[in-house]
Amino acid sequence: MASTAKTALFIVGIACVALLVGERAAAAPTIYVDPPETHVEIGDPFEICILINDELTGLTGYDLWIDYDETLIDLTGVSEGALPAGSSCETFLYWTDDSTPSEMVLINGAILGGWVDGPGEFLVLSFVALAGGTSPITFHDVDLRDIDNNSISAAHIGGEVITAPPTIYIDPHETNVNVGNFFDVSVSINDGLTELTGYDLWIDYDETLMDLDDVSEGTLPAGCGYETFFYWTDTGTPSEMVLINGAILGGSVDGSGQLAVLRFEALVEGISPVDFHDFELRDLENNPIPATAIDGIVVINEIVPVEERSWTDIKLMYR
């Protein structure tokens, strides 16, 4: 009986060793962008880091060619990370984006007379956001060397920078309707606004020009897979204002998409703003999410009786 127990323990021990060996074999030396996704507002400076994992050891020299979209982000500097800067050896670092292919930077460096082992922060790249969009940060090529100038094989994983500022906006920005028509405008968020859990919106419009008929939950929270809460009222609010309150219960949503849909009836000719009087956006920890708000307008046109229409009116109807 004791012999059987020892045999079972021996088999379990072999299985554990095999599992550990398998896990270690599955890991690979890797150089990667951190964080994998960066959200910044236009005009803001920001940094991304180049890290190596604990499987990448004995690193002495490196040449990296890194791609990015220079129309969206501008590279302002490259510096050594904590790993080489904290080594006991003298180091060398050089970088340039002159004479390299468009949207690329060449970074060359070395640990002189020594090496470093991962994990750790290897490089820090400083940028400033120029325009809205999504820029990939990719390794066009990588050449890593050990102290004997032998090549070190490593995987490389890029990232991306989303430079569109978190934005909540009226969609469409301008709506053209005729007197007597019902129409919808949406409150939407862009892909820069992420991890949204709760929202309070105070929206102004000209109630002498158009009447609010209904407000419904947008497709983004409605399709998120979580239970949601949605409420609206224009009772007891200041004139020409509607309060919309909503939440994703136990979860969050990322833009882009609709938060709410407002249905109006056009009453008389005129131009009505559809403005954010105020708004409050919250994440899952109930922390405020800063965002830019973009208002909209509704242009209401009077219907001209058929007998009073000019040839110009008719052409405009059918163009």
Image: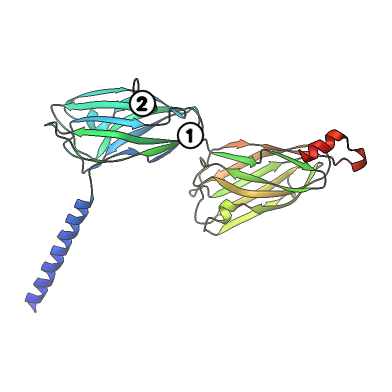
Q: Residue at x 62, y 40 (%)?
A: 169
**Label 2 secondary element:** loop
| Residue occupied by mark 2 | 101
- Up-down relation of residue 7 to residue 267 (above or below): below
| Residue occupied by mark 1 | 163
Residue most extreme to the bottom: 1
Q: Which of marks 2 and 1 is nearer the N terminus?
A: 2
Residue most extreme to the left: 3
| Numbered badge on residue 106 | none
Residue most extreme to the top: 98
Q: Residue at x 29, y 37 (%)?
A: 51
In the picture, measured across the screen, residue 76 lies left or right of residue 236, that is: left
In the picture, measured across the screen, residue 159 lies left or right of residue 285, that is: left
In the picture, measured across the screen, residue 283 lies left or right of residue 11, that is: right
Residue 306: percent from the left, percent from the top? 90, 42
Residue 109 visible in image = yes
Q: Residue at x 15, y 33 (%)?
A: 146
Query: Dot 1 surroundings within 10 Å: few (below 14), some, or many (20 or more)?
Result: many
